[in-house]
Image (cartoon, rainbow, N blue to C red):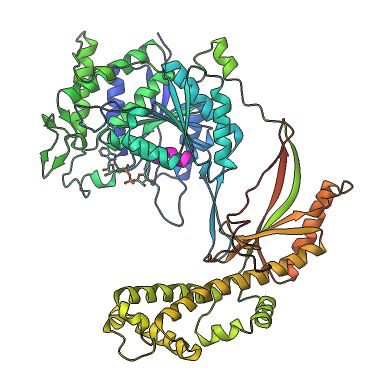
Amino acid sequence: MEKKQTVVVIPGDGIGPAITQSVKEILIASGACLEFEDHKMGKDASLEEINNAMKAFERTGVMLKGPTETPVSTKGQKSFNVTARKGHGLFVNFRRSMSFDPIIKTSFPNQDITIFRENEEGLYSAVEHRHTPDGIQALSLKSESGMYKIIRAAFEYALETGKTKVSCLHKGNILKNTEGTFLEIFKIISADYPGIEAHSQIIDDGMAKVASFPENYQVIVTENLFGDILSDVTTQLTGSLGLGGSANIGSRQAMFEAIHGTGPDILPGGKLNPSNTHIANPSGLLQGAILMLDYIGGTANKKAAADIQNAWLWMLEDGLHTLDIARLKDGVPQNPLTKEVIDTNSFTNSMITRIKRIQTGHQPRLKSLQRLAYKHVSLNPTDNESIQKLKRTKPFAMPKMETKTVGFDVFIKWTGHEDPWILDTFARKSGTDLRDLLNLSHFSTLQEALEYTHWIHECLLLILSKNPELADKSFASPGLPSLIEELGFSSQVSELSDQAHKRSFSDLEQAFEIVRHYHQILVASITHCLGEKLESIAGRHNFRLEAVSCRGQSVYPHIMDPDLVDQMRCTFIWLGLYDNEASDKQIHKDILALLASIAEAGLDRAKTEELHEFRRPDGEWIKGYSDCYGQNMGTSPAN
Ligand code: NAD
């Protein structure tokens, strides 16, 4: 008699309790060697209930989880799902999507894609900060060890299941440090699997190609957010989000679920379900449960998994379909192979009837879906202990790399108009006092003035495009068309027209030319003042100002014509690097002194980041931080 595995069951929210109950009943009927321990986790669960659920998961190692609701809002509960994944080291998110054609007609009858989505890192770290009123950031926290584990798992799976191609979808062209490293590790690991084609593609191209030629992909490995989006797309391509199962696997525990969420629109009384019965398709969670049986292993569980999968295919072929597969329109199934539209309850009963028949010797004669008949997949990282595998999957060895601190980034809250030094310098150099401008034109901040010029420019363009005859007329002439009134621009236009008089713009085209240049000159001049100020501070503390950038775009020393927000990244490189006598301790002293001077100069520090370089085993020093866009492009007012 095999030992029963205890499974923590979380019904979850929305359609979760109904589909979880269905899957539990099917598992019991299948004779799987399991016992269930029910726990609560979800929007109505108390902290104590959630803690108990997590502890039970740590004890038993296996969880079957219904979807849980995570409100979309600026505050509130962090996702339970992500907490369970990250809190237990479940680094693999495994999602397979296969076509059920012709039962569920799709344009891609040969689709069979398995996605290995990295499950603990990236933007899902959800470490976010608002440092200034305008600027907000989300950190994409990643590690080489995390990348190594997920890529290794994808290749191991491909090897075990006889797949011939693994595709790495990445964004290494833009995110050179994080995504570029992902691609590098992919290439290194692929060398251990000479029989498998290692294919890589930039995610945007890859996503488009997956959506149009899914049959060209077998196993895909990608980072967390890309994998999340991609797996919904690939599942939807098979016909319904309700069909996909998902396994979250770590080296100690594993959690199984459906890909989809709480389906609020198909709850009884929901937007798509006026009835008072549950109509959700339990198939996604059921597929998750089959993956769970594969993971737990053992003869009884493998048999149960096979019986469930084959009973499910049999039911699909018999035309018993939930509403998402029947594709109901005005109550009429659009799927020509649907014989009966079933609700969640009938799904459970029909499944149990078929499982019982299979258990008593009936072999369902699958026709079109035979190719999807159950095949065991080894998902448990510890259940194949061959020496070869252990050799290949040896743990990640942290590369030994010499590290040096080379400088630091200070992010400052800065809008220009708050800095008297900049305003004075600007006034001296340009003959224009921005304070007068701000007073003259009701703007409370320079940012507003810049936004406004941008907006006026748009208005002018629109007016001109609809009234080309205005181009050679006097801007302030009477008889501007009623269109201006209609568009609601009249007050702005008359304001501009006042300015036009003062500055004697001769016509509209000239006005909007000037507005455009005004933006560019203003932005370039004030950021240049900031750069000069920071350079003078840096010089006093053994640093060189490398660049100032805004949202990653250079504004000093090189600048194009960017729109600004209120946060500037100021990158300082330590000059002591070139002095053999200077120690690593000295740089930290110099950083503190520089920071103090920045504060004394009235600049408002939002945050700092140290900058490092690393020496690789091949001796090459690599930068551990990114340059900004346009660092050596655009104009330099200094020249
Ligand atoms: P959703 O997946 O709940 O629904 C998307 C669409 O798919 C809906 O039209 C829905 O009716 C349909 N659908 C989903 N499951 C189905 C099923 N079993 N049978 C038939 N049709 C089904 O996504 P959403 O509406 O964007 O999200 C709702 C909530 O679910 C959110 O709070 C979200 O955070 C949560 N969510 C949870 C998980 C999880 O726990 N793993 C995953 C995704 C979303």
Q: Quadrant of residue 432?
A: bottom right
Q: Quadrant of residue 544?
A: bottom right
Horizontal and vertical percent for residue 407? Answer: 74, 52
Q: Nearer the viewer, residue 334 or 49?
A: 334
Residue 224, magenta (yes or no): yes
Tell me if residue 344 comes above or below residue 308 in the rendering. Answer: below
Which image quarter holds the C terminus? bottom right
Q: Quadrant of residue 105?
A: top left
Left of 203 or right of it: where is 346?
A: left
Residue 625, magenta (yes or no): no
Numbered marks: total: 0
Magenta residue span: 223-229
Left of 542 or right of it: where is 233?
A: left
Horizontal and vertical percent for residue 342? Answer: 16, 32
Q: Nearer the viewer, residue 474 or 187?
A: 474
Tell me if residue 603 comes above or below residue 271 in the rendering. Answer: below
Q: Is residue 22 visible?
A: yes
Q: Residue at x 43, y 74 (%)?
A: 457
Q: Nearer the viewer, residue 493 or 355?
A: 493
